[in-house]
Image (spheres, coloured by chain):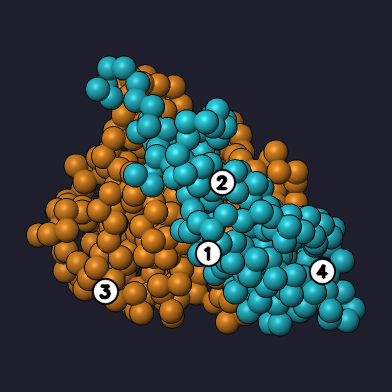
Amino acid sequence: MSLYSIWVLEYGYTSSFPKAVMAHGAFNESARFSYAYVLIKGNGITAMVDVGFDNVAYGKQLNDRFGVENWHSPRDVLSTCGVLPDEIQHVFVTHAHFDHFGGAGLFPNATFYIQERELSRWVWAMSLDRKFRWLTAAIDPADIIRAVQLARDGRLVCIDGVRENIIPGIDLYPAHDTHTAGSQYVLIRNDARSPSSDAWVLAGDLVYCFENLRGGDGDEPAYVPIGLATGSQTNLLLTTHDMLTKVGGETNRVIPVHEARLKDMFPSRLTEAGLHITEVTLGVGQASRVL
Amino acid sequence: MLRHLGRFSCESVAEPASNASLNSETRVDERVIIYVQAMRKPFDELCRAAAQVAGLLVLAAAGSRASSADHPMLTAAAEAYGWANETVRVASVPPAGQHHHLHLSRAASWLGAALHQCRSAPHAILDVDGTLPLLRRCWRELRLATVGLPGFEIVAVEQACCGDHRMRIEVPLAGDWA
């Protein structure tokens, strides 16, 4: 009896993306790159992992200049699961990059949970010489300004390390100095037990694709780090191991939201907008959104 | 076409051509290019200083002990603002750059006000509520400045994942990108 349904909702994509960003060493390969967030629903709770970005606020610059295609608003995307942005109560922010945190203003009733280190190290990076600005790439200062208001409204909760049962059955784990300085991942214990025999990890950008979890050789599994990190590749591998340990070693229970092939691993469908909904698991008493 | 007039494109065409054969339209373009080149760094510095202030505000608003009005980063932000503000103020602005320059000047003005407000509260406590509206106005002007002329970007995505993608779009590799 699962507490929560989990859907990965694509809100845009890049048709041909350099795979070396997704998996270190995959030079001269390309793949579709999904932009997606996660909807969690059940047990009287409606929550998300990350919120995408607000393309309207960017004047569609990202579409036009950086190849993000077919962007759709959270209102459109969530409606495919019968949910409105106003109904989102909790958002677990894996890290502060614009494509994960930039849409925060579109969720007026949500409380956002982020590792304090993600913010404090960003501030630290901002204090360095301009030559270090790579460390703050992909962070939109407007998101930080928005975060000030969220904090003032009591809707930004800074987490320091592990937080178990942030809501029942859901834990937050830090993954410091990996993809970013204060990344975190979300563990859903869908049987509400600890340890859980029905656990799922929402990995944020700690894992971009299946190859990060199992390598390219089916007979000889190996962890392969993502190709874009401000922290250490070693930390990424250790975190990958931790995440897999928490789900009993089952690689299909660590969910990489940017992985376009996720739709082939779980029940899924293509919406009228040309975006994929992937139904990772269905909570007790809830209707499928892909049938 | 805007996508091809980014950060790198402007630099690549900035070398002044020998002028006798240039028509007036080309000379106007040259003045804009020179203006864009001159304003890029002050624009970046204003963005950076505004982001530094925002970062300290969010820490203060979230209750972090790491933020205060005597934080060294605030001094750094004030120095960056001072230089950028002066550079913007004395810039030679071609007619085609006046709209952009208006937004840049306003951004500098709002940032100056935000920095002043930030440090005006007693006991080295950051005045979050007083500073935030000023910072928002600054940021709005900076965003408006990005659409006035090419070559100004707020989010440094050129080093992020989608930035890699952009480079692949503009400089296709042989083989699978044909």
Measure the alpha-carbon separation of dots 3 and 1. 42 Å
Please tell me how many numbered marks the rendered image carries: 4
SS of the residue at dot 1?
Answer: helix
Q: Name the residue under label 3.
A: A83
The amino acid marked with disc number 4 is Ser
Upstream in the sequence, badge 2 or badge 4?
A: 2
Image position, residue A252 (x, y; %): 31, 42
The circle on residue B99 is 1
- In front: mark 4 or mark 3? 4
Is residue A274 toward the left or the right of residue A50 in the image? left
Colour of chain A in the rendered structure image? orange
Q: Name the residue under label 2.
A: B31
SS of the residue at dot 3?
Answer: loop
Q: Assess disc 1: are there few (<14), some (14-19) or many (≥20) residues with their C-alpha within 10 Å of its C-alpha.
A: some
> Does mark 1 fall on the same chain as mark 4?
yes
Measure the alpha-carbon separation of dots 2 and 3. 52 Å
> Does mark 1 fall on the same chain as mark 3?
no
Whether tag 2 and tag 4 are in contact, CB under 8 A, the answer is no
Q: Name the residue under label 4.
A: B68
Q: Which chain is cyan?
A: B
